[in-house]
Amino acid sequence: MSDPTSRDKLIRIASNLFRQKGYSGVGLSEILKEAGLPKGSLYYHFPNGKQELAEAATRWAGAWLERLLDTTFAQAESFDEGALMVCDAIASEVTSQTHVPACPVLSILQAAPLEPRLQITAQEVYGSWTKCIEKHAERLGHPRPDDAAFSLHCQLQGAWVIAFAHQSNAAFTQLARELRTKL
Amino acid sequence: MSDPTSRDKLIRIASNLFRQKGYSGVGLSEILKEAGLPKGSLYYHFPNGKQELAEAATRWAGAWLERLLDTTFAQAESFDEGALMVCDAIASEVTSQTHVPACPVLSILQAAPLEPRLQITAQEVYGSWTKCIEKHAERLGHPRPDDAAFSLHCQLQGAWVIAFAHQSNAAFTQLARELRTKL
DNA sequence: GAAGCAATAGACCAGTCGGTCCAGTGGCGC
DNA sequence: GCGCCACTGGACCGACTGGTCTATTGCTTC
């Protein structure tokens, strides 16, 4: 743990690649090549190999998004306003790169039948996001925090899939327009 | 074309497998084994191999869902009622199998960077669904058919992702409950 | 400088991948 | 019965997969 940069670099690069091509679509050699690290380093930091790396990458990206939810909602004065701000925030994050990346959890989801631990990871990260939104919904006085959290998560997830398919943030701007009418 | 059963069998089985494990997560050998067909048959019916099979499988499943949209909305007396019925219909279709399958388009989406034709296919199928919903929205007198179509597509997509992650149709029933309040 | 450990470097492995190729096979038209 | 052709059967290929293993490096602590 003396030098965390190699481990972090693997996680960051793996997360980016998985979000573009999915878990099964990315080979270790591609990750290693982009990171400029040999195979020995990967198996030193992640003894269980690809699956463990994917789990770490998903949790890392999941935590990043949860921070984004937290800081964005913290600035809002109502739940609906917060929802709109979150939508805009994800849209701009997603478009800031040359390739629109998928939701980090989605990347590993289809590998779940092959790697059971990844399914658990996906469910936990989703649960964590929902709890986070629910917390803010309650704080901002929404009458049904759990319904509100599910609904927003659902809409964001759907918009993200469509945005990924079209490689454009149009779906997010459309969703934002819809959310704005509820203010 | 004299005996379409082999070709159809390949499409059906490929679609099922892709929707469970994603395009890159399924090997040709697995498809062939389950279909009980040799490799020669596959490359006879689909000279361009896996990519062409995946495209056919996606369009096939896409057409199936579009028929479901059409027949379901045809029975509705308002757009909101139709939306609710569609949600229920997908929920029951998805749960009728031992494994909750992902949206057929989602399966091939993450392979888009590797197989450009699949990205086009995905966009076309999505576009076709949206157009179909829009048509019914207009027919049923919705003030903004395009917004309504996007919104419903987005919600269904999100619910499907969550349902797939949890291998349960709870997300659809929750969405249905939400849609019911708008009636 | 020696010992010890964290970390890197990459050769190597068996297995699988998608794809190619050609020899067979069965039914239909003649 | 013969030829034709749609289709099947499967051996075979090079490339690549995730994973293992050992040698080596370089820093730290005596």
Image (tube, coloured by chain):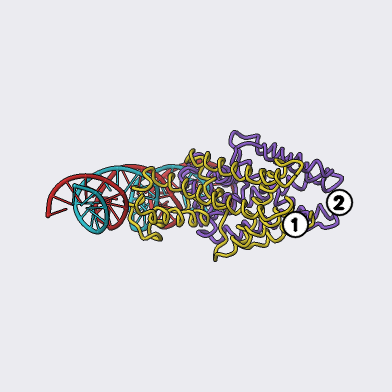
Chain colours: A yellow, B purple, C red, D cyan
Report the Cα–Cα distance between label 2 and label 1.
14 Å
Instruction: Give a yes or no on whether discs 2 and 1 share a subunit.
Output: yes
- In what element is the residue under mark 2? loop
User: Does residue D20 sit above or below B98 in this rendering?
Assistant: below
Question: Which of the two residues, B51 or A178, is positioned nearer the viewer here?
Answer: A178
Q: Does residue B107 appear to the left or right of B176 in the view shown?
A: left
Q: Quadrant of residue A178?
A: bottom right
Name the quadrant of the C terminus of chain A.
bottom right
Question: Which of the two residues, B141 or B7, is positioned nearer the viewer here?
Answer: B141
Residue at x 49% of width, y 57% of height:
A16
| Residue B160 in view here | yes
Q: Does residue A178 appear to the left or right of A52 in the view shown?
A: right
Residue at x 66% of width, y 46% of height:
A133
- In what element is the residue under mark 1? helix
Residue A157: percent from left, percent from top: 64, 50
Question: Which of the two residues, C28 or D5, is positioned nearer the viewer here?
Answer: D5
| Residue B5 in view here | no
Query: The disc labelled 1 sits on which kind of residue?
Result: Lys
Q: Which residue is mark 1?
A: B131
Q: Quadrant of residue D16?
A: bottom left
Q: Which residue is mark 2?
A: B140
Chain ID of residue with mark 1: B
Query: The disc labelled 2 sits on which kind of residue?
Result: Leu
Mark 2 or mark 1: whose residue is earlier in sequence: 1
Q: Does residue A6 appear to the left or right of A65 in the view shown?
A: left
Residue B61: percent from left, percent from top: 64, 47
Residue B60: percent from left, percent from top: 64, 49
Residue A111: percent from left, percent from top: 50, 44
Q: Quadrant of residue A166?
A: bottom right
User: Does residue B87 sit above or below A14 in this rendering?
Assistant: above
Residue at x 50% of width, y 42% of height:
A118
Graded by Cα atoms within 10 Å as few (under 14), some (14 to 19) or many (20 or more), the crowding at tag 1 reads some
